[in-house]
Image (cartoon, grey):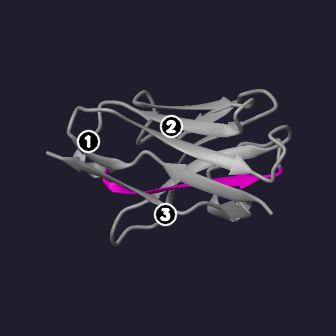
Amino acid sequence: EVQLQASGGGLVQAGGSLRLSCAVSGLTFGNSAIAWFRQAPGKEREGIACIVSDNDDTVYSDSVKGRFTIASDNAKNTVYLQMNSLKSEDTAVYYCAAARSSYGSRDATDYRYWGQGTQVTVSS
């Protein structure tokens, strides 16, 4: 059974940083894609970053490019999202998702496995 456990959310002031973690079990990290999504109240779920484990290829949304970094520790089966220069508009529930794929995608329909969300709140 594939399980994803997201953690690391919290309350931070604008301009601050947080690092989210997504621990993955039941899925061989090779030939997999892991992504982070977020959903703010009243808004659609947004794919913000993904990484392909085979080659560490990454894709970012324009809304986080240059501020957020996704990275994979294959030995720990964990994917991280380092979030810097946080803004109030980054406030959302953040989810990690996984797919058996060598293709990086920010489309939620491409991901079969989802973790529970972790709340990130950025105060202005």
Q: Give the distance between the C-alpha atoms of the residues marked 3 and 1, in whole angstroms.
A: 18 Å
Q: In this figure, which residue is indicated by the disc labeled 2?
A: 81
> Residue 46, image x and y in percent?
49, 57
Q: Residues within 10 Å of mark 1 (few under 14, many from 20)?
A: some
Quadrant of the snapshot with the C terminus: top left
Q: Which residues are magenta?
A: 91-100
Seen at 62% across and 38% down, the residue is 79
In the image, 4 versus 54, the foreground residue is 4
Q: Secondary structure at mark 2?
A: strand
Seen at 32% across and 32% down, the residue is 17
Measured along the vertical axis of the image, is residue 97 above or below residue 67?
Answer: below
> Residue 26, image x and y in percent?
80, 53
> Residue 81, image x and y in percent?
50, 37
Which mark is on residue 87? Answer: 1
Q: In this figure, which residue is indicated by the disc labeled 3?
A: 45
Q: Give the distance between the C-alpha atoms of the residues marked 2 and 3, in whole angstroms.
A: 17 Å
Q: Residues within 10 Å of mark 3 (few under 14, many from 20)?
A: some
Marks 2,3: beta carbons within 8 A: no
In the image, 52 versus 29, the foreground residue is 29
Q: Amino acid at mark 3?
A: Arg
Quadrant of the snapshot with the N terminus: bottom right
Marks 3,1: beta carbons within 8 A: no
